[in-house]
Image: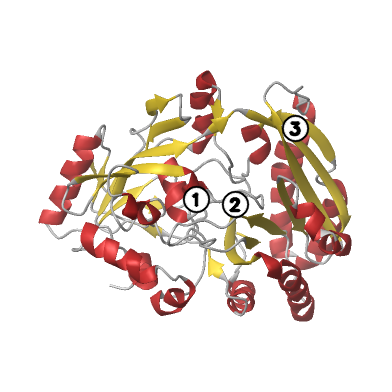
Amino acid sequence: MTRPGGTWRNWARTHSARPARVEYPADVAAVRRAVTAAAARSLRLKAVGSGHSFSGIAVPQDVLVDLSDLRGIVAVDIERARVTVRAGTRLWEMPRLLAPYGLAMQNLGDIDRQTVAGAISTGTHGTGARFPGLSAQVVGVTLVAGDGALVTVDEDNEPELLPAVALGLGALGVIVEVTLQCVPAFLLEAVERPEPVAETLAGIAAHTAADHFEFYWFPGTDVAVTKTNTRLPERAVRRPLPRVRRFVDESLMANGVYRVTCAAGAVVPAAIPPVSRLAGRTFGNRTYTDHSARVFTQHRSVRFREMEYAVPAERLVIVMRQLQDLILERGWRISFPVEVRVAAADDRWLSTAYERDSAYFAVHRYWREDPAEYFEAVEELMTAHAGRPHWGKEHDLDADALRERYPRFDDFAAARDRLDPARVFANAYLDRVLGG
């Protein structure tokens, strides 16, 4: 189905566009027709999922292809625990789709609004020193290349391309199907505690030895909210949060009250420090056990802007201390916490964790606040530590700077030349980060 283009906006309201037309393909053949038509007219086409990227990676120019109708399971290989899904399937749908087969995704990030294709294409990751990002769970991809050809990449078909197409930034084609390596369904025991941030850093080796660990630090305080998740077999006893407690913690406090305080802080910055101190003492003091996806992910309705960088894991403590010093020296009043996670190395060419265990630092500002000064200074700090920016979040690096950080950058460029030589799938963001 084709419709006239209206105004498209991403979730964070950092980007908008008015494509000439919008396609709603109901099947793979319709995607191929859309790509072929765009290529014949020298139009740029962009497949769009949930719009949850903060960067311009998904901004459409001429033709927007909305994959909302390409959802659900295509095939299941029970013996190998592999599931093929359509590209527009949302991450929040995956637990329900996998449950009948006793399977789960190995790891997830803390947001599940993205499509499967969007999540893998931007390098979405979770936390856990033994667990790489979502693209590392990909064992097969089917995409429509720039000439409309249908290309399948898996262990039997051009396997050498998998490290490129499994995390392809939307630059190599329109992904229509993804095959994921799943694991038996499991529970997570979640222990969330506030503690002095100095203690967190001093004990970081023990903390990150857990299956999954992350912490939040509220600028202007000396408190970290730690989150430690331990994997348990599905047969273990579930002790989920009571509905009232979950509502109070995640809907009322984390979203409702926090939205009001962020809005107030944008107008009266002096209100931020006491709110941050209160949040550090009261948020995240709970223990529960539930299905993995219900522990990994959180509902976030407070709109914000975000930058995230990956640095070598061994630099976590020094980078954190330098970030604390930076915020203190500049006297910034930041209402959103700094989120710190870890992830295992992988072999995806444009992965922020390519061939190195990584520590991730995510910084945020309320969407009505100007993040420029804060983000620019944080980016300077992170690049001094060989930082690699998350592709779906705000950053200012270009192709020359990124080539220095990715050993397989030119190999990815060669794959792009092959699959999309006419740059049908390019946009301003890809022109900047990949070159012409």
Q: Secondary structure at mark 1?
A: loop
Query: Which residue sits at x=67%, y=56%?
Result: 341
The x, y position of residue 18, in whole percent, is 31, 55
Residue that label 3 marks: 246
**Badge number at residue 92:** none
Residue that label 2 marks: 303
> From this viewpoint, which residue is outermost toward the top?
100
Residue 60 in view in this figure: yes
Height in image: 403 above or below 344? below
**Quarter occupied by the N terminus:** top left
The x, y position of residue 46, in whole percent, is 30, 53
* Residue 241 relative to residue 168: left or right: right
Q: Nearer the viewer, mark 3 or mark 1?
A: 3
The x, y position of residue 385, in whole percent, is 62, 76
Residue that label 1 marks: 11
Q: Nearer the viewer, mark 2 or mark 3?
A: 3
Q: Residue 160 is drawn in which quadrant?
A: bottom left
